[in-house]
Image (cartoon, grey):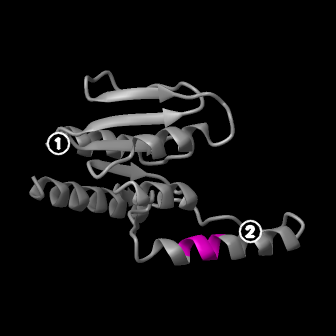
Amino acid sequence: MAPVTILVDADACPVKEEVYRVATRYKAQVRVVSNSPFRVPVSERVKRVVVSDGFDAADDWIAENASSSSVVVTGDILLAERCLTAGARVLKHNGEEFDKASIGSAVATRAIMADLRAGMDGMGGGPPPFSKADRSRFLQALDRVLVGMASRY
């Protein structure tokens, strides 16, 4: 039985502290992947992975290390698709879970929105602000996913 590893796409992740707390409770490993170093808790279970600043270097590392014993935390739809293909569970920062049934429409919507933004000459509002409710939903979702993964073993 491989231990559960939470792979965090860390550069724009607002829920790192929540990941550390939940991972401690479930004795999960955490890999915090980014292009630049920043502080992570001092723990045998939490490791910082700093990759090159090459385009998609962090995404590539996460996708290459994702497996059926991984939970990936990312808001990147294309990375989510790659990780699902590798068998990982994937959570957005707001607690929504990407799965094989939803990823196709998410990729298509992303492409449509990119086309719309390109036609607006840079105008657009971006995502809504991250809220306490989003944080709470993420905590509940990560807990649910880890409980589900633990019951497989």
Q: Which residue is mark 2?
A: 114
Q: Position of residue 97 (x, y in %)?
A: 38, 66
Mark 1–mark 2 distance (CA, rounded to whole Å): 39 Å
Which secondary structure lies at badge 2?
helix
Residue pictured at 60% horizontal, 37% vertical: 57
Residue pictured at 45% horizontal, 57% vertical: 93
Chief SS of the magenta region: helix
- Of the 4 image quadrants, the one containing the N terminus is top left
The residue furthest right is 121
When the figure is inspected, residue 29 is found, relative to residue 40, above or below; the finding is: below
When the figure is inspected, residue 116 is found, relative to residue 149, above or below; the finding is: below
Q: Position of residue 102 (x, y in %)?
A: 45, 76
- Direction from residue 33 to residue 53 in the image, left or right: right
Residue pictured at 25% horizontal, 42% vertical: 23
Question: Label 2 near label 1: C-beta < 8 Å?
Answer: no
Q: Position of residue 65 (x, y in %)?
A: 40, 40
The disc labelled 2 sits on which kind of residue? Ala
Q: Which residue is mark 1?
A: 25
- Direction from residue 135 to residue 69 in the image, left or right: left
The magenta segment is 106-110
The disc labelled 1 sits on which kind of residue? Arg
In this rendered view, identify the residue nearer to me: 132 or 79: 79
Kindly indicate the quadrant of the structure image that contains residue 53.
Answer: top right
In this rendered view, identify the residue nearer to me: 151 or 123: 151
Label 1 or label 2, whichever lies nearer to me, is 2
Mark 2 crowdedness (10 Å alpha carbons): few <14, some 14-19, many ≥20? few
In this rendered view, identify the residue nearer to me: 22 or 86: 86
Residue 40 visible in rendering: no
Which secondary structure lies at badge 1?
helix
Residue pictured at 19% horizontal, 41% vertical: 2
